[in-house]
Image: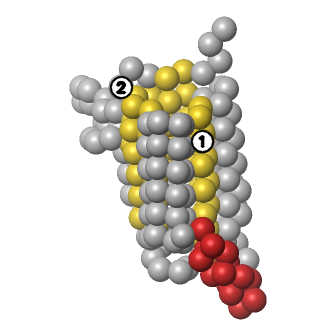
Amino acid sequence: MKDYYIGEAVHIGNNSVIHPMCTIGTIPFFYRDEVDEFKMVDIGNDVVIHSGTNINYGVLGKTVIGNRVKIDSHCHIAHDCKIGEGTLIAAGFVSGGFVEIGKNCRIGLNVTIKNRVKVADGTFIGMGAVITHDVSGRIIADRKNIDKKLLEKIDTLRGEFQ
């Protein structure tokens, strides 16, 4: 019994793991009816995608998941998104279309990112954040204020991952 769906125009790199109940290469929700052809999903090497995650085909270009990305359970990655190498995404993440997340980012539980938003390399986005504008630099975005000690600890941890 097949417990996942992988579309025809999906490339999956070496040593990547797709867990049960994932749908990869699905037709996206898009506001225009005149889309004649959906593009591909390109998944890099050493990627792990946990159960219940959905990744849409691109509409105007590819949806790209970079090398060494880890995506937790029950996430939705919309059409034409680009997830940078080494990024970790926790459960419940939802993106609109055309979102670009840089390299080595950390995305917390239940984060939502509005369509066409760009997140810079190395950004940490805390649990429950709703991101509606581009995030650049070492910004920490979440629903509560974060103290200096936590910022210092995150910088230390970030150095260990790079």
* Residue for badge 1: 48
Does residue 114 sit above or below 162 in this rendering? above
Give the CA separation, mark 1 to mark 2: 19 Å
Q: In which quadrant of the rendered image does the C terminus lie?
A: bottom right
Q: Quadrant of residue 106?
A: bottom right
Amino acid carrying mark 2 in the image: Ala
Callout 1: SS: strand
Q: Quadrant of residue 155?
A: bottom right
Seen in the image, is 43 located left or right of residue 109? left
Callout 2: SS: loop
Tell me if I can see residue 162 in this picture.
yes
* Residue for badge 2: 9
Task: Identify the residue shown where x is 60% and y is 49%.
Answer: 70
Residue furthest out toward the bottom: 148
Seen in the image, is 129 located left or right of residue 118? right
Does residue 64 sit above or below 147 in this rendering? above
Task: Identify the residue shown where x is 66% and y is 38%.
Answer: 50
The percent coordinates of residue 126 (x first, y second) are 67, 68
Q: Nearer the viewer, residue 141 or 18?
A: 18
Q: Nearer the viewer, residue 16 or 9?
A: 16
Q: Earlier in the sequence, mark 1 or mark 2?
A: 2
Amino acid carrying mark 1 in the image: Val
The percent coordinates of residue 74 (x first, y second) are 67, 40
Q: Residues within 10 Å of mark 2 (few under 14, many from 20)?
A: some
- Coloring basis for residues: secondary structure
